[in-house]
Every structure is written in C-alpha cells, then in structure tokens.
Image: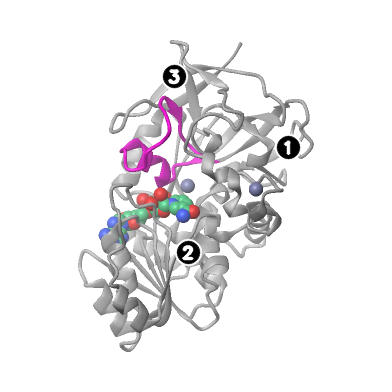
Amino acid sequence: MMKTRAAVFYEPNKPLLIEELDIDEPKTGELRVKMKAVGLCRSDHNVMVGARPVGMTPMVLGHEGAGVVDAVGPGVTRVKPGDHVVLMFIPTCGHCHHCVSGQTYACVLSANIAKGPQLDGTFRLHNRQGQAVGQFCLVGAFSEYAIVNQDSVCVIGQDHPFNSACLVGCGVTGGFNAAVSRAKVRPGSSTLIIGTGGVGMNVVQGAKAAGASTIIAVDLVEQKLAWAKMFGATHTINARKTGVVETVMNITNGKGVDFAFEVISHPDTIAQAYEATARLGTVVVIGLTPANFASLPISPLSLVLSQKTVMGTLYGAGNALVEIPKLLRMYKRGQLKLDELVTTTYTLDQINQGYEDMVAGKNIRGVIVFD
Ligand SMILES: NC(=O)c1ccc[n+]([C@@H]2O[C@H](COP(=O)([O-])OP(=O)(O)OC[C@H]3O[C@@H](n4cnc5c(N)ncnc54)[C@H](O)[C@@H]3O)[C@@H](O)[C@H]2O)c1
Ligand SMILES: [Zn+2]
Ligand SMILES: [Zn+2]
C-alpha cells in the first residue's frame, strides 16, 4: 500500500495533524497527482475554525494546488502521466446543464465539494486507525499525493513554476474573474475592494486589467495596502484608521463606486461595500461568511430605491478549464503578477505556522512547497 504524508483536519480549532495515510490506487476516471505546491487559502481556514461546516472528519484540506500526474486509472482520457496540472476546487463534469451552457463554475458536481468522499461515495485515504479520510473540494491538496477525478484537474504547460501556478486554482481565478467575468468591470469605472489578501489582491489585478480608473483597496494591514498599490490600486484606505464609506465618498465626489467587492467574509464589510456603492452600482460578495450568519445587512427598501445589484460569486464566474491557461498565459507575458503573490513558502510540516501567519496578516499568500 502506498503512503502519503498529509495535513489532516480532525476537529475545529485544533491544529491540523501531519500524519502518514494509506492511499489507494486511482479508480476509473481518476489519477494520482504528486503535489508540488499548494496555496494557503482562507477557505480551508474557515473549515479549520468551524465557520464552514464539512460533511465529515477526518478530512485532508487544501484545494489551491498544482503538481504532476504520476499515475492514471482506467478510462482516463483527459490527462496522462507526466502532465502538469492545476487542481480545480469545483469539478467540471462537462455534460450537466450548467457545464454545457458554459458555466462550469456552477457544475452540478459542486454540491459534493465539502462532503468528503469521492464522487462514487468511497474514499481513497485511510489513517492508521483504519478510518476513512475525506478530501476537501474532492482534492485534499495538503498531501504529498492526491487521488482526484479527471474532472478536477486542468492541464497546464510544463514551463510554469508550481509555486505560483497553484494560485490560479483558486484565489487568482476567483478574484481576477470576479472583476472581469462576474461584475464585468468597464473601462473608466470606479471599484472598491474590501480585503486585499490572497483573493482580493487579484480583484485589484482584474479591475486594473478591465480598465477601471479608480481602484480603492481597503485593508487593516498597512503592508497589504502597500502591496495593493503595486498590484494596481489607485487609492488605499486603512479601515483601522479611517471610515471606509466616508473616504470612498470623498474619493468619488459623493457618488460611491460603480463596483464594490467584499473579499473578507463578514456582514459588516458586506454592509460597507453596499453603502459605498453608487446608485445602479454592483456589489459582489466573494467572502465565504460563517454559516451562523443568516442574512444580509441590507435594507430591502434601499435596494429598490438605489437600484443596486448584489451578487455572489464562485470562481469569479470563470470557466476554470479556459481561465487557468489564459491567466498563466497573461502571467508569462507579464500581464498578470503571480510570483509577487507568494510572500512566504512553507514545508507541509509548517502548515499550522503558515495559517497563523495568514491570520496575523503577514502574507498575501503563503504557499506549501513539496520537495
Ligand atoms: N468565492 C470564491 O470563489 C472564493 C475563493 C477563494 C476564497 N474565498 C473566500 O474569500 C475570502 C478571502 O479569502 P483570502 O484567502 O483572500 O483571505 P485573506 O486572509 O488572505 O484576506 C483577507 C484580507 O482581509 C483583510 N481584512 C480582515 N478584516 C478586515 C476589515 N474589517 N476591513 C478591511 N480588511 C480586512 C485582512 O487583513 C486580509 O488581508 C474568504 O472568506 C475565503 O473563504 C472565496
Ligand atoms: Zn480557495
Ligand atoms: Zn457539470
């Protein structure tokens, strides 16, 4: 039986446990990925602190990964051993209503991503006690090896560094496309990005690429705001020091922004985004707010009278199989910053430190690098 070292989630508010797991051979339609790099996205942390319920424990978290295919099961046609792949946190089945409509970010299989087992209901990982171990987002990337369905991978060129390529599996696509594909930011428009971490920084990049003339970045950490300027922000607001809505109104001559993005995960910052948006403007909620918050803090009367649009988005409404290669092409031509997003790298054994650093606001993205 092959073994893999992985970071396993057993219970909320406890460190991830690094342990050796038994890993099965790939079944029909599946492949084994030797992981090379995986980003520390806040969505895994939401699970670690119990804010996002998952179907079971133990579970290997991690979904922003890249690696090399080293074995394939029967019936695999889309990939072959040696291919470099980026994992997708929403699979693309290719034939459900949404996939055939060109909206793979809403593939019906997305209903299964927080349950634990593979799509056939069985498990590929087992711990020393013989317990079945789930895989978050069907991938479980915090592991030296992952068995995943071919619907969960996007083949990329062989010349991309894994450390930065992994980020297009979630945060880059989820942020960049939220501006470009979901909100459809227009040239000359004004934008507000509340929370410029690993995802929000890519909303900044997306707004810039879409031609926004005003890009206001909001964070609590001065260093993130300095970084945001480097990624394209025209204005920055430290929410610890200044009122966000009031400052946005000053910058936009009392109008508010055309597009506001909440990239944290709190009702209060969603309310800020809403209030700082102009009449007829658009509010995009990207942050995954803890499950115990049941409603949006938005006045229904104001929604109608201001004629604003409030929308949510996953993967930025980007079709990952198209967007991942596109974003990597932009990176190669110097049109998208990826290396600059990776502020610290860690080993798998340092993963809990990596998440502590994220919470402390030290990184844009921390990335686990496997040898
Ligand atoms: N919808 C999607 O497709 C998608 C994809 C990935 C992540 N997410 C979610 O997006 C959110 C952000 O993820 P991330 O990985 O970028 O997290 P992150 O921790 O890297 O970034 C969050 C940023 O918000 C800042 N912040 C916190 N509170 C603030 C406040 N009150 N005012 C201003 N700034 C504040 C932090 O300093 C940090 O820079 C999470 O909820 C995550 O689960 C959604
Ligand atoms: Zn993510
Ligand atoms: Zn589908």
- In the rendered image, residue 24 lying in the magenta stretch gets the answer no
The answer to which of marks 1 and 2 sits earlier in the sequence is 1
Which residue is denoted by mark 1 in the rendering? 83
Q: Earlier in the sequence, mark 3 or mark 1?
A: 3
10 Å neighbourhood of mark 3: few (<14), some, or many (≥20)?
Answer: some
Camera-side residue: 71 or 36?
A: 71
Give the distance between the C-alpha atoms of the residues marked 1 and 2, in whole angstroms. 29 Å
Name the kind of residue labelled 2 in the image: Val
- Chain part drawn in magenta: 38-64
Q: Is residue 118 above or below residue 38?
A: above
Which residue is painted at 69% across and 24% down in the image?
Answer: 27
Residue occupied by mark 3: 19
Which corner quadrant of the image does residue 319 belong to?
Answer: bottom right
Q: 209 left or right of 189?
A: right
Q: How far across and how far down the image is residue 289, in percent?
A: 34, 52
The three-letter code of the residue at mark 1 reads Asp
| Residue 328 rendering spot, x and y as whole percentages | 65, 55
**Which of the 4 image quadrants contains residue 74?**
top right
Judged from the image, the secondary structure of the residue bearing numbered disc 1 is loop
Amino acid at the residue labelled 3: Glu
- The residue tagged 2 is 203
Residue sitting nearer the eye, 118 or 210: 118
